[in-house]
Amino acid sequence: MRTFDPNGLGTLVERVVAEARPLAREGSVASYIPALAAADPARVGLALVDADGRSHQAGDSRDRFTMQSVSKPIALALAMESAGEEAVFSRVGKEPTGDPFNSIIRLETSERRKPFNPLINAGAIVVSSLLPGSDAAEKGEAFRAFAGRLAGRATLDRDEEVFRSERETGARNRSIAWFLAELGLLACPVEDALDVYFRQCAALVDALDLARIGAVLALDGLEPGTGERLMAQRSARVVKALMFSCGLYDESGEFGVDAGLPAKSGVGGGLMAAAPGRCGIGAFGPALDRRGNSVAGLAMVRSLSAELGLYAL
Ligand code: GLN
């Protein structure tokens, strides 16, 4: 396994952030969830955690933001660990769509009658319904405890304003969820499934948290530094495979070719990547491209991959 020169890494991370800062001007913050519109588009942060648990950070790496869709692969891992792989993949597929994250169209037109994958909203809402717990509050807590553990914390805080803002305005997700209910794919009442989904999307992290979680995935479920097992190897591998093919929606193929890494974005500006066997990367930049992916985040992960030879395939 290749290791890093820790002295050079700090400088590299600083340089990559400095180069990405001007790019933030090319994107715009998400505003369809009203509370997200207040984010500062100029923020840019980056963190890397290696297999020994050493971290390197630069820029706004300790700014907190809501996970949004970065929560989806984590919820998927938790559902696989608790409900089991068969329960998950009998309700949701493993195929990319080439569609935007919130697209509803294939739920009706596709013969498979289930969401294409767990990283688009439709699939993620099914996964949220499968989380452990008897109601939305318990499922939400289970998510926060699991994600917190992966990030090396007791739990994660939640941004109540973003949670409420999305719950009040999420008509598209509500439509998707009712469609899923009609197909018989939800494992709990439809309003509970939505509530859990909005709760996990509003979980607060920083770039370092995402780098730590990415490192656990990179190490096939082991905690960097301690080697303690935090999820089954199988869960980590399935999650990474789906992140590679579906993690950036209709930009997954292009990013996969450029950076060669499994990654997951969120409209809060977060981007998490896992370089198998090597490191986790957490990037933050709330200015998004038109597919809903962080402009600076994508550029920084691409640069690190090129500079450190992280290409996984
Ligand atoms: N909560 C957001 C939504 O469902 C998450 C989307 C995203 O981050 N791509 O619309």
Image: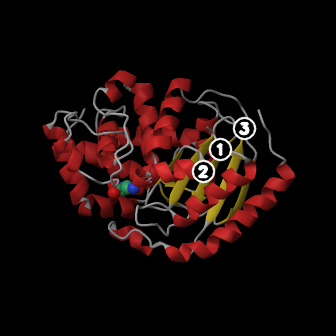
User: In terms of secondary structure, where does tag 2 sit?
Assistant: helix
Q: Say which amino acid is labelled 1.
A: Tyr
User: 203 left or right of 25?
Assistant: left
Q: Could you give the CA–CA distance between mark 2 and mark 1, rounded to whole angstroms?
A: 6 Å
Point out the image quarter for the N terminus: top right
Say whether marks 2 and 1 touch (CB < 8 Å): yes
Q: Earlier in the sequence, mark 2 or mark 1?
A: 2
Vertical comparison of 117 with 251: above or below: above
Report the residue that reaches farthest toward the left. 182
Task: Calculate the distance from the C-alpha at mark 1 to the C-alpha at mark 3.
Answer: 16 Å
Residue identified by numbered label 3: 51
Pick the residue in front: 150 or 91.
Answer: 91
Residue drawn 60% across and 30% down?
A: 220
Instruction: Classify mark 2 as within 8 Å of ligand 1 or not, answering yes or no.
Output: no
Q: Earlier in the sequence, mark 2 or mark 3?
A: 3
Q: Are marks 2 and 3 in contact (CB under 8 Å)?
A: no
Which residue has dot 1 on it?
Answer: 311
Residue at numbered disc 2: 259
- Of circles 1 and 3, the one toward us is 1
Amino acid of disc 2? Ala
Percent of width and height locating residue 290: 40, 66
Q: Which of marks 1 and 3 is nearer the N terminus?
A: 3
Q: What residue type is labelled 3?
A: Ala
Local packing at callout 1 (Cα closer than 10 Å; few below 14, some 14-19, many 20+) is some
